[in-house]
Image: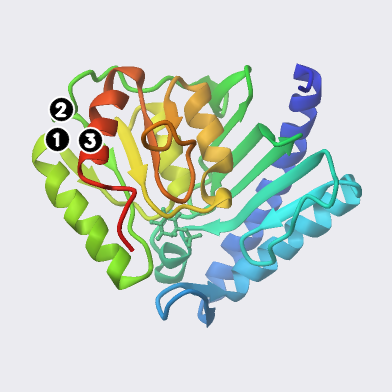
Amino acid sequence: MVTMDQSAELLALAVSVARSASDLAARMRADGVAAVATKSTATDVVTAADRAVEQFVRDALREARPDDAVLGEEYGGGRDGARVRWILDPIDGTVNYLYGLPQYAVSLAAEVDGVVEAGVVRNAATGREWTATRGGGAFAGDARLAVSGETDLGQALVGTGFGYAAPRRLHQAQVLAGLIGHIRDIRRFGAASIDLCLVAEGTLDAYYEQGLNPWDHAAGGLIAAEAGALVTGLDGAPPGPDMLVAAPPALHGQLHDRLSALGAAEGP
Ligand code: LIP
């Protein structure tokens, strides 16, 4: 448990580092982007900016708080016995970044004793920034956020995403085929951290995705929860790689039950 002052201090550092990291990502994008490697599949790309931005954030955090641990998408990391662990996606929405689609973000969360206490998501293309501290609310700039008031799944605009492996994508498409006739429509923007912030501000009614990593949702999940969303897995599980569902309480059960019936957390 941390005090509000401690979480505010962690958030201030996260925001400062994320803004500088976001500027670096934008500069490197302007200079031209190319994939320098692939990870899980031929379409799971890494750019030089992913690596450079993560190294920048690691260096900044080490200078400010040398005893903290860092878990990042590109260079991994553990807890190393530290109370505070930073969870980082240097560029969430890497494919968007590669193509120049303005939906990619620096996502940085501070976890204390295993609980995310502060987080920031900053769209590096547009500069839109979302923040939260646990118990302190969620904000876009100075505007306090609240989730959608929609109560009918059939009227809900729902975000989702798809994995990099074809067998997983086919399963996800089958789940979507079973869902799409029961919602207003689907949106696939390509960056989970931003999708979660759109739920927090009510510009998406709900979001779900299978296959997320901790760095995809650590910050955005806190922001969505602090704006009033329920952020869970399926059938009592916590949000994680099997499934993440984020929705206002009035919609969460309807979406959850359909996803559970469709076996959304199963498959390859
Ligand atoms: C992305 C996620 C997105 C998912 C993509 C990809 P990355 O993360 O934010 O929700 O649908 O397949 O995993 O790889 O750009 O950091």
Please indicate, yes or no, whether residue 204 appears anywhere in the rendered image: no
Image point (38%, 55%), residue name: 190
Q: Could you say whether the residue bearing mark 2 is in a helix, strand or loop?
A: helix
Comes first in the chain, label 2 or label 1:
2
Residue hosting label 1? 184
Q: Do the residues under discs 2 and 1 have CB atoms within 8 angstroms? A: yes
Image point (15%, 35%), residue name: 183
Comes first in the chain, label 1 or label 3:
3
Mark 1 CB lies closer than 8 A to ligand 1: no
Q: Do the residues under discs 3 and 2 have CB atoms within 8 angstroms? A: no
Q: Give left or right: position of 99 versus 105.
A: left
Coloring basis for residues: rainbow
Reply above or below: 211 against 16.
below
Q: Quadrant of residue 172?
A: bottom left
Within 10 Å of disc 3 (Cα), the crowding (few <14, some 14-19, many 20+) is some
Residue hosting label 3? 157
Please indicate, yes or no, whether residue 138 appears anywhere in the rendered image: yes
Residues 203 and 268: in front is 268
Residue hosting label 2? 155
